[in-house]
Amino acid sequence: MQTSFVEKDPETKDFLPLNGTDHVEFYVGNAKQSAHFYKTAFGFKTVAYAGPETGLRDRASYVLQQGKIRLILTSPLKSDSPIMDHIKTHGDGVKILALWVDDAYKSYEETIKRGAKSYQEPQTLTDDFGEVRTAGIYTYGETVHLFVERKNYNGAFMPGYIAVEGGYEPESTGLLYIDHCVGNVGWNRMNEAVQWYEDIMGFKNILSFDDKQINTEYSALMSKVMSNKNGYVKFPINEPAEGKKKSQIEEYLEFYEGEGVQHIAVATHDIISTVREMKKRGVEFLSAPPRAYYETLLQRVGKIDEDIAPLQELGILVDHDEEGYLLQIFTKPVQDRPTLFFEIIQRKGAQSFGAGNFKALFESLEREQELRGNL
């Protein structure tokens, strides 16, 4: 049972330098309507589009942006599309976790020679705004890491897309960047996935939790947090653990029909304002923990800048580590299958992942599972 951060070795050369998350691409049943949801409810705006009007015959893709967060929502236009096969199996979900790199070709070569399975060989896309180089590999399940090199491009997104300006643009809700993306893998698969990130991507396991830490009366899970060398990209990996009833990870694996991205954590500088605005727009969050959670909050985490009342009103959780504290809250699944959801997080120094909130979070998740008849 390990609860502390692993020291990074400054002497080790990073063979896969990453600048951060470039974008996350979802395969969805209706990209036009999904784009409207993320714009209205989350405060994104459409910045680019690709589809039949741009010469793309098999799909339509909308690029949404808020702060540094880019989401691509892609739908197939015909039933024989592999995108349609993905949606049929998994429902709406994340297909691509794209990583921003300085050299996409080298990133591909370095990971392939270490044993990665190829998704897309290196290619260079060009238009009047310059060039973008991309290449991709598979990670857990059918999920893909796409390496994106865009240092020689100044268009709206990348070649093949046209810029979209004006139209329906709701106000931002204050979301800034992707803090981390969490993957769920099958029984006894976590260590294998962790080894893959270490061997193929050069990541380090910076934090680990076992089923003694992450549990309730009914269910448990195990989790390890993987980080690249500079800490810009973090991928926690979860697997189910034995419990009296079905855990949230088991429910995900059953309804996603395989391994995949469980949730995307997006950061804000003012979580109270962000969550209040998102609730006004119809975003559904997990139910708040019992009053006792807030009555003992300061005893657990120490002094915080925020008033307790709005945190309790909104159901925002607070945790701390040796570097500070964090505030977090989780949406309900954003599609009918109980799979992908979002975390809203504000860091006030803390670099951890809310271990002190796991019990309250799990109990809230289990209340939702029970309503769905899946506990």
Image (tube, rainbow, N blue to C red):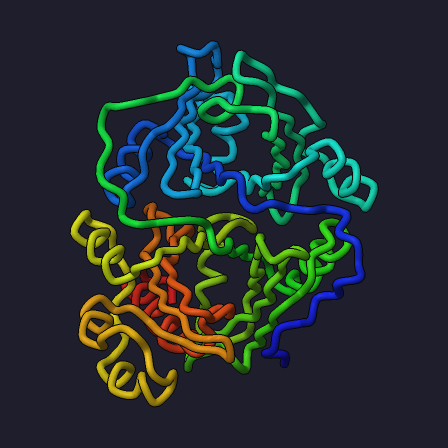
Residue 265 quadrant = bottom left
Looking at the image, residue 330 sits to the left or right of residue 58; the answer is left
The residue furthest right is 113
Total marks shown come to: 0
Seen in the picture, residue 366 relative to 339 is either above or below; the reply is below
Q: Residue at x 34, y 46 (%)?
A: 335
Seen in the picture, residue 232 relative to 58 is either above or below; the reply is below
Q: Residue at x 47, y 13 (%)?
A: 57
Q: Residue at x 51, y 80 (%)?
A: 322
| Depth order, front residue of 97/249 | 97
* Residue 88 in view, yes or no: no
Looking at the image, residue 170 sits to the left or right of residue 64; the answer is left
Q: Residue at x 64, y 39 (%)?
A: 101
| Depth order, front residue of 86/236 | 236
* Residue 119 in view, yes or no: yes
| x, y percent for residue 208 | 60, 72
Q: Quadrant of the N terminus?
A: bottom right
| x, y percent for residue 230 | 64, 56
Residue 38 quadrant = top left
Q: Quadrant of the C terminus?
A: bottom left
| x, y percent for residue 18 | 64, 46
Seen in the picture, residue 87 relative to 289 is either above or below; the reply is above
